[in-house]
Amino acid sequence: MQDLAKKKINIKSPAKINLHLEIIGKREDGFHELAMIMQNIDLADYLEFEINNEGLIKLESDCKDLSLSDDNLIVKSANLLRKKSNIDYGANIFLRKNIPIGAGLAGGSSNAAATLIGLNNLWDLKLDQETLCSLASTLGSDIPFFINGGIQLCFGRGEILEKLDSTHEYGAILLKNPNVSVSTAETYKKYSSKFCGQYLTDRKMIENIRKNLRDNGLKNLNFDNQYLSIKNDLQLVVENENDSVKQALYLLSKLENCLTFSMSGSGPTCFALFKDIETAKKELIANYKLFRNKGYDSWVCTFLEKGITFI
């Protein structure tokens, strides 16, 4: 404990965008069967971990809009790890928040995975990746992705992961109205009531969709400077109900050199892809005032080869 008490861990906890989000159907366990491609981007939160002597999990943040109690995924992750490992260590955790809340960028899920990785190191638990992924899957469907991050195929409810090899160096522009957030659970519920009339039982169909995404998913990103669309089934619900999303998609569609555009996750963040980061930066500079006048925060991001990293 003497050596551990001196340790301080700093972690970069990045957001993700969806390069494909397909809802195959509703499962009998109440979750949805998904086929997705998720990609980490370099819009990130930062977490600092150190051991305290009180055996408590203490979370602080520079974000005033975030609950710091037991319902926070960071606190849930820390408590789960303590229980799993049967230890009495505590931790002081500070979250510097950059990823907007309720944005479809999975900032909370990223923070949860970062907590599992950070405290595994801080407390010297030596849990392997498989164990961390298993713990992550009990906390939320997006969280296992962030244990390894980068770009991955995500199947099942999101916990079945397959690594993809990609050297894409696209630049992305993100738009989000800071006054608008979307509930992921409510969006899935609305999609389900509209499009999932019965439970999913056709395993062959599921395997065919998975195989198709394996075979063709990344080929759809070989844009070769021509426009392609990104599939996001949740956009069918959110775009029709949310003027912020509808307008963001329209603004992105009009950008010069835009290769494709989409909503991320359950929204309301929308993004456009460009052949490289320099092209994206030029487009943001040219349109920043327009985005601001229309009520949007905006970011330029690159794709990350890795997810959560120690800094």
Image (spheres, grey):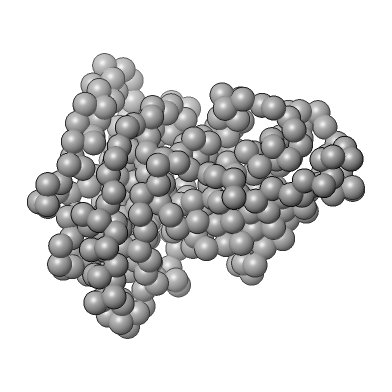
Where's the N terminus, which quadrant?
Answer: top right
Q: Residue at x 21, y 54 (%)?
A: 275
Residue 286 point in image, percent of width and height = 24, 77
Q: Is residue 37 left or right of residue 136?
A: left
Q: Is residue 81 above or below residue 240?
A: above
Q: Residue at x 35, y 79 (%)?
A: 292
Residue 70 visible in this rendered orientation of the protein: no
User: Which residue is farthest top?
Assistant: 204
Q: Quadrant of residue 267?
A: bottom left
Q: Residue at x 38, y 27 (%)?
A: 162
Q: Is residue 24 left or right of residue 52?
A: left
Residue 162 visible in this rendered orientation of the protein: yes
Residue 33 point in image, percent of width and height = 37, 31
Q: Residue at x 82, y 47 (%)?
A: 6
Which of the two residues, 244 or 214, is positioned nearer the viewer here? 214
Q: Quadrant of residue 240?
A: bottom left
Tell how many labels: 0
Q: Is residue 250 above or below residue 184?
A: below
Which of the two residues, 249 or 147, is positioned nearer the viewer here? 147
Residue 256 point in image, percent of width and height = 15, 67
Q: Is residue 155 left or right of residue 167?
A: right
Residue 13 point in image, percent of width and height = 54, 50
Q: Quadrant of residue 137?
A: top right
